Amino acid sequence: MKKEKLVLVGNGMAGMRTLEELLTIAPDQYDITVFGAEPHGNYNRILLSPVLAGEKTVEQIMLNDLDWYAARGITLHTGKAVTQINRARRQVIAADGAFAPYDRLLLATGSDPIILPVPGNDLPGVITFRDIQDVQAMVDAAHAGRKHAVVIGGGLLGLEAANGLMKQGMEVTVVHLLDVLMERQLDTEAAALLRASLEERGLRFLLGAQTVAILGEEQVKGVRFKDGLEIPADLVVMAVGIRPSISLAKAAGIHCERGIVVNDTLQTYDPRIYAVGECVQHRGQTYGLVAPLWEQARVCANHLAHFGISRYQGSVTSTKLKVTGIDVFSAGEFGGGPGCDEIVLRDQARGVYKKLVVKDNRVKGAVLYGDTIDGSWYFQLLRESTDIGAFRESILFGQAHLGNAGHGGGNNVLAMPDEAEICGCNGVRKGAIVKAITAQKLFTLEEVRAHTKASASCGSCTGLVEQLLAATVGDYSKTSREKPLCACTEHSHDQVRKVIREQHLTRLRAVFDFMEWKTPDGCHSCRPAINFYLIATWPGEAQDDAQSRYINERVHANIQKDGTYSVVPRMWGGLTSPQELRAIADVADKFQIPTVKVTGGQRIDLLGVKKEDLPKVWADLNAAGMVSGHAYGKSLRTVKTCVGSEWCRFGTQDSTGLGVKLEKMTWGSWTPHKFKMAVSGCPRNCAEATIKDFGVVCVDSGYELHVGGNGGIKLRGTDLLGKVATEEEAMEYAGAFMQLYREEARYLERTAPWLERVGLTYVKQRIVEDGEGRKALHQRFLESQQYAQIDPWAERASGRVAAHEFEPLRRVG
Amino acid sequence: MYDWHEIGALDDVPRLGSRVAQTPHGDVAVFRTADDQVFALRDRCPHKGGPLSQGIVHGHRVTCPLHNWVLELESGQAVAPDVGCATHYPVRVENGRLWLGLNNVVSLAAVA
Ligand code: SRM
Ligand SMILES: Cc1cc2nc3c(=O)[nH]c(=O)nc-3n(C[C@H](O)[C@H](O)[C@H](O)COP(=O)(O)OP(=O)(O)OC[C@H]3O[C@@H](n4cnc5c(N)ncnc54)[C@H](O)[C@@H]3O)c2cc1C
Ligand code: SF4
Ligand code: FES
């Protein structure tokens, strides 16, 4: 079948974005020809400001270079303005006579800068700020030693031009007709703050000044104003506005008003001709920012591909000023109006001003100066017309301030839905960024920019993208270069582990020597970590070094604030008996233990035991059949259970029994951080299994296995690992999961952050999909348990182990 | 000045470990470092009274078990950024025996 012919007029941001969208959904539909008046490939016009300011080069802002077109078989005519459309013959014709036939035509001619109709406006040295050529002219002027620049127009574009020229070394005066800078984006107060900080940087302002003439004979020499004032100028930049570029369409008889009129599918009055970008007028509206263009491009591509299912319904826009070091954000109707309230925050010392315009508890507009981090959040509230009643009082403190009890360190961007737009410039949504980060394994901001274009334009969303990156891959600054384990070394946790395994190191001293530790015997951070890595890697072989254990693990009891200890015997699965309770009561009496308490882990704590009494307390508890509960260890803690099918009218399986079996299998094991389990007999989940490191929820058909929960400092519900049919499988999965965690997590990293770092997919792949691997992990776990399941209390009560720990050296005097 | 008391053998204290001598001055923690040097500090952390004898010994320092302050064994001074000092006592080793020097004017404040 012969391909249809598509011609694009206007090699700029909107037109090319439409082609890119089209090529992803219908790569083979068209033979494509592109005409561009500029002699380049497509570049990011927004970034002309940083180019002018010397912060970027022209190469860095190219979006589609010539190879890009060639690789996709697109015929590109650069430097050729189309001067005529022959709609009857379906041809476009360029100034030099080149022509191209079309089945579909896309107009994306952008807009033209307005030139003030004053005498002298055509003098050499009078320019606008629209394309690479203009920037070149400005840079040349600055380099040629011309001194005075006058920028006419105190809007977004004018201020960016002025800032850039100043950076190029010129003395710059900004002339503005009104008294308020950026009056379309800012209120009086924010504008005044902006003016003050720009003046501080060296810009001069002439406000309320109407230009009546540009002076000079062969070259611009000055500017004259209505009140007769004249100021010198070697360069005049007009940045007073833009006008949709419609002359080509108009001449071809296509219906135009202010712009080329299009319907919700971006079609003009000629059904074969579409238009996108600044040249269009849609529902009476024209746009001068890129965000709306991305939405238009998506819809237009959909129709060019004959899918016919999406509609463009107009855009709400927000703006930021791209002057490095100055943060300004504005969106919506910030001017207020009838029925509107203003919520305002001023913090002069910090140079912060924030104003929200609210009507019926919905955000209608926002102006932020100095602190714009929450701009995208306000913008989202505005677009989605969210009822802010619930957090109206604190809304100006930002999203991070929203109450999120239990979720320490809540993260703004995490709270955003996947559809939320992160990068307004390039229309990139949160979901797309997260997907790219995970699917393409991106680690750095540059990679995310390259793959998604997010944060690649004005850069104002960089903070958000960084947050996303950090949340998705863990802190990326650490990922790209891992943090050293502690100040005693340059090596990271993972490197130390690797060396221990590969070099078969079994002693701390060997690690210090091999890895050239900077301190003679480490410190309280690295010693416990290395000791764990050694015994977890070489069970039975590595020497467990008592002096590298934190006091609780060294003496197998929890130190209390007064230097006494607490003793928590194991109660398997939360079960106890009259005999055990009697023994506990006797011990408490005999040793005058002040406090007996039921713990949050379904067992009993004896608090306030003197250190020297510990071995005797343990001996008595041992005699009644009780062993250490490891309430002090980076080790298996408790396995909480509920009563389950044995008693409960809802119980589906023997949750108590399974809990006991799990605890018998896993007790005594050392883990990177503490490890807690629970088994609930039905989804009512009375044992709270879904906030445990490993949790089982019994259901009629088997056992749901949950991992990575944490009920502590930062609440995290588990992720579902999978479902199994039998107790044996549940045990095998538990052993394998614990072993994987033991082998790969970093010391003091609990399962929740570990899981978030490596990803659930990875863990599933190792435990669920790889059956052989699971069995091997479980086997390694059981093997290491042979060396771990020795009751430390019995050892010490016998007096043969570490007796010196519990007795004073000598009583003197 | 000092009364010297024999408090046991060097090998009664594990390397990179510590044991307590109970004295009229209160508990004194006796530390032994990896290079077999011996130091003695009052067994009370200047922060909140944590038992220093239960801490992790590294180099010529000990980390308090309660909130991880690090103290110099030689001087009892806390390592910056923390500020504080634990009383230190002279100890010496003679023929494998440990001798602790106690000021013979018992300070009432120390006992309290
Ligand atoms: C005794 C007990 C409180 C009680 O009276 O009930 C307790 C006491 C302590 N907890 Fe806990 N936790 C106790 C159940 C819990 C629970 C509830 C549970 O296990 O179902 C949690 C939340 C669940 C969880 O861990 O996900 C809990 C979360 C923490 C945390 C936060 C851990 C986290 O990952 O965010 C810490 C701090 C830490 O480990 O770094 C902590 C630390 C402590 C320490 C060890 C503080 C310390 O470093 O000295 C306390 C020791 C007191 C002692 O000497 O006995 N405790 N702690 C509970 C002992 C349970 C047991 O039988 O072993
Ligand atoms: C300096 C500067 C800074 C900006 N900063 C921001 C910002 O921070 N945020 C923001 O949202 N927006 C910003 N903008 C606006 C943004 O760049 C425009 O909205 C966007 O480029 C419009 O895209 P477009 O495709 O409609 O037009 P353009 O990108 O202008 O593309 C139109 C192209 O068509 C060509 N053309 C026109 N007529 C013909 C013809 N007859 N034949 C062949 N080719 C033709 C033109 O030469 C041009 O290359 C900025 C603009 C400038 C100039
Ligand atoms: S919550 Fe846990 S750590 Fe905090 S005081 Fe209670 S027992 Fe101690
Ligand atoms: S008591 Fe020693 S650090 Fe707090």
Image (cartoon, helix red, strand yellow):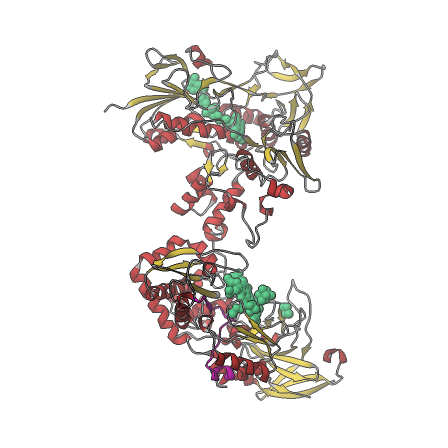
Q: Is residue A478 above or below residue A324?
A: below
Quadrant of the picture in which ligand 1 is shown: bottom right
Q: Position of residue A221 (x, y in %)?
A: 64, 17
The image quarter containing residue A21 is: top left
Range covered by the magenta-colored residues: A618-643
Q: Is residue A97 above or below residue A428?
A: above
In the image shown, does A272 or A5 lie closer to the viewer?
A272
Identify the residue at horizontal 43%, vertical 32% (top origin). Answer: A63
Q: Position of residue A412 (x, y in %)?
A: 54, 45
In the image shown, does A313 or B22 lie closer to the viewer?
A313
Q: How many marks?
A: 0
Q: Is residue A779 above or below residue A582?
A: above
In the image shown, does A60 or A791 lie closer to the viewer?
A791
Identify the residue at horizontal 69%, vertical 68% (top origin). Answer: B84
Q: Quadrant of the N terminus of chain B?
A: bottom right
The image quarter containing residue A705 is: bottom left
Taking the magenta stretch, the answer to whether it contains residue A632 is: yes
Q: Is residue A489 visible?
A: no
In the image, farthest residue toward the front: A649
Q: Position of residue A84 (x, y in %)?
A: 40, 12
Q: Position of residue A389 (x, y in %)?
A: 61, 40
Q: Quadrant of the C terminus of chain B?
A: bottom right
Identify the residue at horizontal 53%, vertical 83% (top origin). Answer: A615
Instruction: Tell me: A37 left or right of B97.
Output: left
Q: Is residue A200 visible?
A: yes
Q: Is residue A298 above or below residue A481?
A: above
In the image shown, does A9 or A378 lie closer to the viewer?
A378
Taking the magenta stretch, the answer to whether it contains residue A623 is: yes
